[in-house]
Image: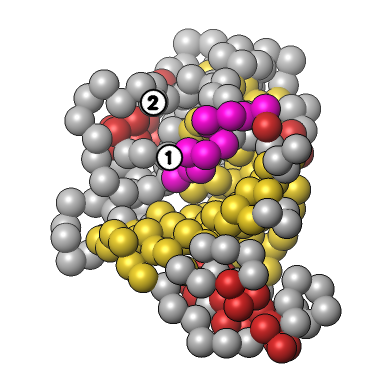
Amino acid sequence: MTVTQDAVNLDHTTETLAAGGPDPEYFDWAEAWYPVHYVEDLDKTRPTRFTLLEQALVIWWDPQAAIWRIFADQCPHRLAPLSEGRVNEAGLLECPYHGWAFSGSGTCEQIPQAVPEAKANLSNRACVASMPTTVHQGLLFVYPGKSENAERVPIPSIAALEEEPDDWVLLNTFRDLPYDALTLLENVLDASHIPYTHHKTVGKRENAAPMQMDILELGKQGFKGIWPEGPRKGKLGTQHTTFVAPSLMYHDLTSKQFGRTLTVVYAVPTRKGRMSVIRQVPIQVFL
Ligand code: FES
């Protein structure tokens, strides 16, 4: 649960930039960090395909730098998907079509069909876009916007997990859903559905009651709120909810019955009407 990758410098010694870009009236979805995978589920021996904001990406392990890389999943030669290639013996991402091979920075290092004196691989047109990446709290994140902004934009993460990282039991799931990411986040916020939709699992119909969340902070980057009565007609205590735009929402509930429970949802927009949901339920049991 610690930062182990240094594709970008995240010490934030320079001035922090807010996610979403500088326009106060407009949130630029590209100017934010998104989780794309649990690191423990990635295979270092083969590239993995992922789609983010309608763009096909390829995730691959760069053995030379010992970090995860994310490129546009399109070879600059004849547009073949690099995710169907391989990491070759030299540690380069190799296109499956004609074998052009790329280093972690996206530079073309090999064109097998080129004559020895050719310099075509040095052209910018032979490069692949390599996006900033980092690993945080067990997740691989990518920054699809302007790469020069990446290290100044905060990672959307859970501060409580950093405070006592060994005290949590994590229940982690990953699913692709035919569901809009914002619709899913609205569902996470809408606690009033739980007594009915989740009757006999985490809810009971008889617990339906008026629900109110007081907003503590609100802005372009999200909000923080508190439910004074909390779920189950107040039987569990007060609940806090945080939204970090555009993709992270989590509830934080401490009760005598269950200890401290976080319900964390990253709703990652893949393409129109579709998303990947990264759901974590960290539980801290008080003995
Ligand atoms: S399409 Fe990739 S090397 Fe030709």
> Does the magenta run of residues contain 103?
no
- From the viewer's side, name the closer residue of 124 and 33: 33
Q: Position of residue 148 (x, y in %)?
A: 28, 33
Q: Residues within 10 Å of mark 1 (few under 14, many from 20)?
A: many
Mark linked to residue 155: 1
Q: What span is in magenta?
A: 156-166
Figure quadrant of the N terminus: top right
Q: Is there a contact, CB below 8 Å, between mark 1 and mark 2?
A: yes
Q: Position of residue 31 (x, y in %)?
A: 33, 49
Confirm whether residue 65 shows in the render.
Answer: yes
> Does the magenta run of residues contain 163?
yes
- From the viewer's side, name the closer residue of 44 and 187: 187
- From the viewer's side, name the closer residue of 13 and 116: 13
- From the viewer's side, name the closer residue of 271 and 260: 260
Relative height, residue 109 to residue 245 (above, below): above
Confirm whether residue 99 shows in the render.
Answer: no
Q: Main secondary structure of the magenta part?
A: helix
Figure quadrant of the C terminus: top right
Q: Residue, x 58% and y 29% (percent of image)?
A: 164
Type of amino acid at the residue the image marks with label 1: Ile
Relative height, residue 286 to residue 241 (above, below): above
Q: Residue, x 41% and y 55% (percent of image)?
A: 244
Mark linked to residue 10: 2
**Callout 1: SS:** loop
Give the Cα separation between the discs numbered 1 and 2: 9 Å
Tell me if 252 is positioned left or right of 93 in this view: left
Tell me if 182 is positioned left or right of 253 in this view: left
Type of amino acid at the residue the image marks with label 2: Leu
